[in-house]
Amino acid sequence: MATLNDEFLYQVFAIVEEIPLGTVATYGQIARLSGHDKNARLVGKALSLSEYFGKYPCHRVVSSQGRCAPGWFEQKDLLTQEGITFKENGCVDLKKHQWKM
DNA sequence: TAAATGACGCATG
DNA sequence: TCATGCGCCATTT
């Protein structure tokens, strides 16, 4: 199971915390690394909570297409500050910045 | 208990 | 790149 109060949350945060600066990771990627490849949605849920937790670079996590979180305007600025290059449409250039392992 | 929801992913066109 | 549609699954209503 991948309930939010389970290890899942800890796993997600641990991975997010290890995303190198100037690099972004996708929800699906984190989900897969945490061992819950089908629960990409839960990753998003956890990250939304991480904002309340505070100390995690959740802004480095985007969708598989490099799309930012809907309704979250800060993310683009934060990523730009870290050197992430954005496209005109507002998508991250995954080709260059996606977290490779 | 069932139906709706969502910071998603992938396949098509 | 954008628009649709379908699948996935925990959470919420």
Image (cartoon, coloured by chain):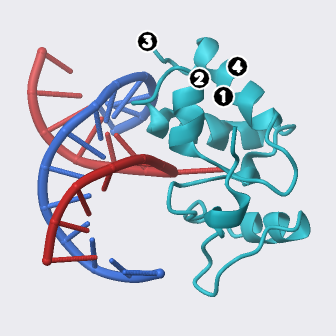
Chain colours: A cyan, B red, C blue
Q: Circle 2 marks a residue in which chain? A: A
| Residue under label 3 | A1
Q: Nearer the viewer, mark 1 or mark 2?
A: 2
In the rendered image, the vertical position of residue A79 relative to residue A48, given as above or below: below
The answer for how far apart the CA atoms under marks 4 and 1 are is 6 Å
Residue at 87%, 68% in the rendered image? A83
N-terminal label among 3 and 2: 3
Residue A18 appears in the picture as rendered: yes
| Residue under label 4 | A10
Q: Circle 4 marks a residue in which chain? A: A
Residue at 54%, 55% in the rendered image? A63
| Residue under label 2 | A34
Residue at 75%, 43% in the rendered image? A51
The answer for how far apart the CA atoms under marks 3 and 1 are is 14 Å
Question: Dot 2 lies on which element?
Answer: loop
Q: Indicate the position of residue C11 as horizontal and vertical percent values.
A: 45, 28
The answer for how far apart the CA atoms under marks 1 and 2 are is 6 Å
Q: Circle 3 marks a residue in which chain? A: A
* Quadrant in which the C terminus of chain A appears: top right
The answer for how far apart the CA atoms under marks 2 and 4 are is 9 Å
Q: Amino acid at mark 1?
A: Val
Q: Amino acid at mark 4?
A: Tyr
* Left/right of residue A82 with respect to residue A85 in the rendered view: right
Q: Amino acid at mark 2?
A: Ser
The answer for how far apart the CA atoms under marks 4 and 3 are is 14 Å
Viewer-side residue, C3 vs A95: A95
Q: Circle 1 marks a residue in which chain? A: A
